[in-house]
Image: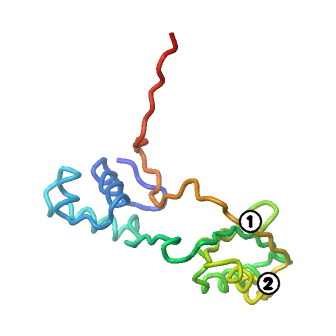
Amino acid sequence: MPKTQHSSISLDATDWKILARLQQDARLSNVELARAVNLSPSPCLARVRRLEEGGLISRYVTLLDALALGLTVSVFIQVRLERQVEKALELFERAIAERPEVMECYLMTGDSDYMLRVMVADVQALERFIVDFLAKIPGVGNLKSSFALKQVKYKTALPLPGAVPAVTTSRKKRP
């Protein structure tokens, strides 16, 4: 049985099926999940608990519609620090962790030190975020923002071994 890179849990095909189904719909009842992966409810629940305890399932969330909630501006912000020293990195990361409009933050290689994805209601809210908060974090040297015009693809499900794309296309032969 293959082991995951960061976990000592060995996963079989049924475990992978459980993970895939829960990524699609975390609200499935245990009975529905068990039926979907061809197990009886008790062993299915035991497997889910083992996956949770092993850290493979970290949490269950509800995904909300940003546009319906009035969060219409999605911005990617590249941040360059004046110096890449441990104290500056820690200070920046602590400050960013507190902000609800920061959806994602990555320490990067290349021209910028960090890449942020920020969701706000409008351009004025973005201006307040940048001027009143981001630019005032000690050690921030340069900011570069890019507005997302359209979300082409968004998913939360991780690619799992053996996963097959849901949509396949076939080509017709030309005469």
- Type of amino acid at the residue the image marks with label 1: Ser
Residue at 40%, 73% in the rendered image: 61
Q: Residue at x 46, y 51 (%)?
A: 159
- Return the x and y of residue 83 as percentages of the image width and height: 84, 77
Name the residue tied to disc 1: 146
Q: How many marks?
A: 2
| Residue furthest top as drawn | 175
Query: Which of the 4 image quadrants contains residue 102?
Result: bottom right
Position of residue 47 relative to residue 60, above or below, is above
- The first of marks 2 and 1 along the sequence is 2
- The crowd level at tag 1 (other Cα within 10 Å; few <14, some 14-19, many 20+) is few
- Name the kind of residue labelled 2 in the image: Ala
Question: Closer to the camera, 24 or 151?
Answer: 151
Q: Are marks 2 and 1 in contact (CB under 8 Å)?
A: no
Residue closer to the observer: 49 or 20: 20
Residue 77, position as x, y percentages in the image: 73, 70
Specify how the rendered protein is coloured: rainbow
Q: Where is residue 43 in the image (x, y as percent from the top left)?
A: 17, 60
Q: What element carries label 1?
A: strand
Q: Which of 66 and 45 is in front in this view?
A: 66
Residue 135: assigned label: 2
Judge left or right: residue 2 versus residue 90: left
- Give the secondary structure at mark 2: helix
